[in-house]
Every structure is written in C-alpha cells, then in structure tokens.
Amino acid sequence: MSTALINVRLETELKKNAEELFAELGLSMTAAINIFLRQAVRSRSIPFDITLNSVPNEETMAAIREAIKVAHDPKAKTYKSARELFEDLDQE
C-alpha cells in the first residue's frame, strides 16, 4: 500500500492535547487521523455533529424563560386544539 503525506497546521496546545488523548487511547496522531478519514469516507459525511452553538443564544434563552413563565401562569390563555388557537389568531 502506498502512502501520502499531509501537512496540517494547528495550534501547539491543540496538538499537545490531542497527542496526550490519543496516547491514552493507545493511538498515534497518524492512527487517529486515519480512523477519522476512514470513517468519513465510509459514512460519506463528517463522522460527528458540527454545530455553531450547542448552547442557546440570549434571544433563545429569553424565549425559553418567557415560555416557562407563561406555562406556569394560571391566567394565561390556553387552547384545546391547534384549530382553536388559529381561529383565535384569525380574529385578532
């Protein structure tokens, strides 16, 4: 099997931390990268979720707090069905 060389630039601290982790797992950096690439090729995707934020931003948190407040407010208007809600919205 022939091999190819890849040069990758990364932060020194990230490289150090990754090497320590992989060593604990019994892997070299090369083996870990090969595992990642093989899994990506096999699944035809990045083999893990990539998200911008795993924590809701302040606007979303404000909406969540408001929803919780309304859910616990005994004076809040409630609906028995989505149809009832939409009928009420159409009247506004």
Image (cartoon, rainbow, N blue to C red):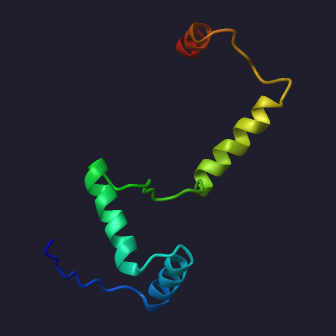
Q: Quadrant of the C terminus?
A: top right
Q: Residue at x 59, y 52 (%)?
A: 59
- Please name whichever residue, 15 or 53, is drawn nearer the observer in this view of the structure: 15
Q: Which residue appears at 24% of the width and 85% of the height?
A: 7
**Residue 65 horizontal side relative to residue 31, left or right:** right
Q: Residue at x 59, y 57 (%)?
A: 55
Relative height, residue 9 to residue 36 (above, below): below
Furthest-bottom residue in this view = 12
Along the line of sight, the residue nearer the viewer: 24 or 10: 24
Q: Is residue 56 above or below residue 75?
A: below
The answer to which image quadrant residue 39 occupies is bottom left
- Vertically, is 17 above or below 81? below
Residue 82 in the image: x percent, y percent? Answer: 58, 12
Q: Pinpoint residue 71: horizontal percent, then vertical percent.
A: 77, 30
Q: What is the residue that sits farthest to the front in this orientation?
A: 1
Q: Residue furthest left?
A: 2
Image quadrant where residue 36 sits:
bottom left
User: Quick one: quadrant of the N terminus?
Assistant: bottom left
On the rendered structure, is 28 left or right of 17?
Answer: left
